[in-house]
Amino acid sequence: MKRSLLIIAIIAFAGCASVKESLYQTTNVYVGSAISLNTIEHDTAAMHALITEFNSITSENAMKMNSMYGDSSHINWAAADNYIDFAKRYHLRMHGHTLIWHESVPAWLRKISNKSIVDSLVFNYIKLFVSHYKQDVYGWDVVNEAISDSLGTYRKSFWYNLFGTTYIEKAFRVANESNPNALLFYNDYGIENDTIKLKAVLNMIDSLTARNVPIHGIGMQMHISIDMDMNLYKHALSEFVKRGLLVHISELDICVNSNKNKDRFKHFSHHAAKLQKDKYYEVVKTYLDIVPRNQQYGITLWGFSDAHTWIVNYCKLLDWPCIYDDRMKRKPAYYGMWKALSE
Ligand code: G3I
């Protein structure tokens, strides 16, 4: 669909809906979603839901290093510019994801083994990128997933193998120099229930703050299942709160099948829907209860519809982790989240 037609369709659609029911309007905390714009370009209902329900947005892939460069060693700003324009047009807070991630190193960069060349490339990239969107990006995931699962050690990534741990501190410092107003986050998964990983992340943050590194918040990704242990989650939240960090639930989705229990649900039964609704409620309610208002950066879903979720598209798993179904209807999970936000 041409962009102009799409916009007309959205305006017509928006006119019919009651905005009072929207998620973000029930609360004073930011509620967001990650999304790839090309995924919803042809899906008017998804586009409508996105701009109605949320007041914050995260670039699912467009602002990753491999997307910014592609096969070339020159930055291509087009996709990120498009994203920023979209966020501005619909008054969505823009969260930048992510400056340094082991999975998004461009293939051509991976081939360079000279430390000083990579140093100059990557930190100039951060400087250029963060300054370019100085007016537009409110917060950045500066470093993503630097700690290994269950081991409590640093991930032996491309970055770590070249620089040891020093790239983390430098990335935060350069991002801060490039935009002193941006809120800077460390973002990771599994820290809500992997206590060894949590401890390693806390140690890293303590060591960064002891050296006055400008880190403002933690992104708890929260790709979880309905089995997640609430006590471990509460413990993790309170550790971050104690340190005065902003807390962002940055990539929330809740699977009904888990790693341990892959085949529990072969279809999305009423029972599964109820368990998922309860979990969305508990997760959001607990966040709002434990994290003081001035430390709540917000809650971001990693996609809001089962039609476009990475769990099905990327992981090829049988699941229904989102709050909208694949026909863009609100699921019980939606109302679980809505209830927690509106209480
Ligand atoms: O756009 C191309 C398409 O042109 C091509 O035909 C197709 C063939 O595979 O690939 C498409 O790109 C894929 C892209 O998603 C868009 O669907 C990439 O191969 C695929 O690698 C990419 O996956 C993303 C993944 O990160 C890796 O970057 C997922 O969408 C995205 O949801 C996921 O997000 C991560 C967060 O950044 C960090 N936390 C975990 C989270 C889930 O893995």
Image: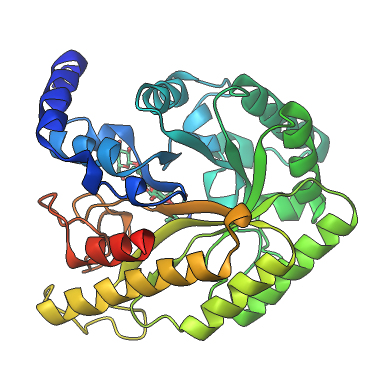
| Residue 152 in sight | no
- The reply, left or right, for residue 15 in relation to residue 320 is left
Which residue does the image show at 61% across and 20% down from the upper left?
132
Which residue does the image show at 49% across and 64% down from the upper left?
288
User: Where in the figure is residue 112, as x and y percent of width and height?
Assistant: 69, 37
- The reply, left or right, for residue 76 in relation to residue 339 is right
Q: Is residue 306 above or below residue 60?
A: below
Q: Nearer the viewer, residue 125 or 73?
A: 125
Q: Is residue 89 above or below residue 107?
A: above
User: Where in the figure is residue 108, as x and y percent of width and height?
Assistant: 58, 34
What coloring was used for the rendering?
rainbow
Q: Is residue 49 above or below residue 298?
A: above
- The reply, left or right, for residue 332 in relation to residue 79 is left
Q: Identify the image quadrant of the N terminus.
A: top left
Q: Identify the image quadrant of the C terminus.
A: bottom left
> Could you say which quadrant of the image residue 209 lies in?
bottom right
Residue farthest toward the top in the current orientation of the protein = 4
Q: Nearer the viewer, residue 128 or 331?
A: 331
User: Where in the figure is residue 161, as x and y percent of width and height?
Assistant: 74, 55
Which residue does the image show at 40% across and 51% down from the upper left?
27
Which residue does the image show at 36% across and 83% down from the upper left?
227
Q: Nearer the viewer, residue 114 or 158?
A: 158
> Could you say which quadrant of the image residue 243 lies in?
bottom right
- The reply, left or right, for residue 131 in relation to residue 26 is right
User: Where in the figure is residue 153, as x and y percent of width and height?
Assistant: 72, 71
| Residue 131 in sight | yes
